[in-house]
Image (spheres, grey):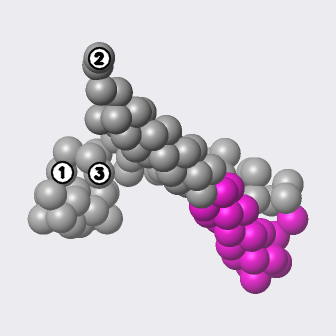
Amino acid sequence: MADFKRLNRYRAELNKMKDKRADIDNKIREIERKCKEEESITIREIVREANMTPEQLATYIGMNGAEKLRKINATSSTETNEEREDRTKDEENL
């Protein structure tokens, strides 16, 4: 007759691992939520310290920040620190 001890042991181990994975996934989601919340709090604090209204912030971002952020994000992933410094110096000289 077949011995299912090893198979049952593997199944039990598999179920334990799946439970651990579910716990870890839940912890990851919770930490991601906390990070997002902390980012929001930090942004609000910066705006308050600058004595800006939400409208002023929106205007600032719309006029200056959004375009600058797009440029930074487009170049930051591909350029080195030296290239970034050179580009910044070039922009300052314009």
Alpha carbons under labels 1 and 3: distance apart:
6 Å
Q: Quadrant of residue 49?
A: bottom right
- Asked if marks 1 and 2 touch (Cβ < 8 Å), the reply is no
For image coordinates 81% across by 77% down, the residue present is 48
Check the image and report above or below for 62 versus 84.
above
**Which stretch appears magenta?**
29-53
Residue 28: x and y in percent read 55, 54
Total labels drawn: 3
Can you say whether 13 is above or below 61 in the image?
Answer: above
The residue wearing badge 3 is 76
- The crowd level at tag 1 (other Cα within 10 Å; few <14, some 14-19, many 20+) is few
Q: Position of residue 15 (x, y in %)?
A: 49, 38
What is the CA distance from the residue labelled 1 to the residue labelled 2?
66 Å
Seen in the image, is 54 located left or right of residue 23?
Answer: right
Residue type at the position of mark 3: Ser
Whether tag 1 and tag 3 are in contact, CB under 8 A, the answer is yes
User: Few, some or many C-alpha atoms within 10 Å of disc 2 (few <14, some 14-19, many ≥20)?
Assistant: few
